[in-house]
Amino acid sequence: MTNELIRSKLTEKFGEQLIGWEEPYGMLTFEVPTEMNLKVLQFLFDDPELKFQFLTDITAVHYPDNKGKEMAVVYHVHNLVDNVRIRFKVFTDINKPDVFSATALYSGANWMERETYDFFGVNFIGHPNLKRILNVDDMEYFPMRKEFPLEDQTRRDKDDEMFGR
Amino acid sequence: MEHIKLPPGSIEKQTTTLNLGPTHPATHGVFQNIVELDGERIVSAVQTVGYIHRAFEKIAERRPLYQITPLTDRMNYCSSPLNNIGWHITCERLLKIKTPKRVDYLRIIIMELARISDHLICNSIVGVDSGAYTGFLYVMQYRELIYEIYEEICGSRLTTNIGRIGGFERNFTTSAFEKLEKFIKEWPIVLAEFENLFTRNRIFMERTIGVGPISAERALNYGFTGPNLRAAGVDYDVRVHTPYSSYEDFDFTIPVGKTGDCYDRFLVRNGEMQQSLKLIKDAYAKVQAMKGAEADIYHADVPEYYLPDKKDVYTKMEALIFHFKIVMGETDIPVGEIYSPIEGANGELGFYLISDGGRTPYRLHFRRPCFIYYQAYSELTKGGMLSDAIITMSSLNLIAGELDA
């Protein structure tokens, strides 16, 4: 199975709604409209030719400069029969980071989504138990967002212009 | 119940809630399970994770590539070299570095040694939890020998920080190869004895057969990978599916189980140790067969990422510049996005790395196999005995460091 075939099957089904086709390091990557992530996952799962039935990973990336589309939820799915991996992204607004949960399709999505919620605050609609998993329960922020720098930027003792801190 | 005189007004509860962990002598690591028991049967189990979360993904966003290696050590600390080399391979894929064959083979030796030491711990701990301590103490000697080999190569034992982007920090010493030969010679006998102790041991079989089983469909749906998936009968192995580090040059088989219970997981891990030994032997033979200049190569020629020799730093300008740039993390990483999987000891260990052209990763995500398959634990233990839950946990090979990252 080639990336072209996957792409043509997906465009045939979803038309122009899927955008941003790329192939970084050989892995087919595309963008899916926010409300369609489950439809695409389900289609990739059910299609007798595509058979993307193994969910490798769900995670998120925060792009603070990408106004209105700050949060990208990234799905990696794998067709174990033909050994092809693809990746797709769903962009959401950081003020309303709502994405449909894939837990009904994949049991393994449960903790992946909880982790993503824990670190990025992505709200997975339909998740049975969306609460923090690795961080403490009473944490009030989402630490992997870019506005939380690792070091306190106001520290003078570490202000080091030469080495790009 | 009629013999127990409950004080008036008390509500009779049919089940007992038991807090197993976070530090319980029977769980090897920091795991908490809140189990609901009916007598000794488990009605439900809720896992709590995150007790040793160290925010590696966040820390990695502020570090140049070579400083992330020590973070990966601390994920699956029973097989740190696998994580280290997996990370180096990710960087090399991103930077499009081609490593020499000798580096690949040396890496295979180290990676398979790490796999053996990891499976060894797991299987012997399953033994300990079913009441057989001997195997555990006996095989520890050979884990020690593996650690001594690491020590000869990188100077440390548990959290190894082994290798560099492009290869190894130094060539393998003669004594490293001597220890490897000793291992190749003695290990098969020990493994055979270890298997004799357990494989057809009636008590062990009674304790593990049919305990914590999972079907292939459920395992795939849960995102299982590695020995736990193969025990359920799916022959998925990253070393075969997406070969890296020249695994395609070797001939080896993938052991698979059938029922996905503790016994099958045990057998699959034993089978993998046999295969790992074969891989080590073959790779070592290939390394030994190399002649001339090829026989001394231990790293790729990537001056921007590979630290130069110290004597060059003192005498040559270019080496000094590269040394400075690497140590201060001044090298810009090319823009790119890559998901790079390797076959870790527990399954598919993935590194999802996004670079925006800066000196540090824009985003780095670790796909930790442990974290993903531990969610099936409550399904695996439901309806079973409490003591079976302990064995199930050890036979899944849960490593707290990998779970929490």
Image (tube, coloured by chain):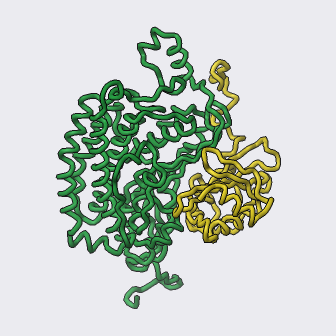
Locate residue A145, reporting x and y percent: 69, 45
Q: Residue furthest right?
A: A68
Residue B314 location (% of width, % of height): 45, 10
Q: Is residue B296 above or below residue A89?
A: above
**Which residue sits at x=25%, y=69%?**
B204
Going 20% across and 69% down the picture, which residue do you hit? B201
Measured along the vertical axis of the image, is residue B215 above or below residue A140? below
Identify the hue of chain B: green
Q: Please state if B63 lies on the left or on the right of B277 as rendered.
A: right
Q: Which quadrant would the N terminus of chain B be assigned to in this image?
A: bottom left
Residue B283 image position (x, y, % from top left)? 31, 42
* Residue B293 rendering spot, x and y as whole percentages: 35, 24
Q: Is residue B134 visible?
A: no
Q: Which chain is yellow?
A: A
User: Is A76 on the left-hand or right-hand side of B49?
Assistant: right
Q: Is residue A115 left or right of residue B98?
A: right
- A142 lies left or right of A35: left
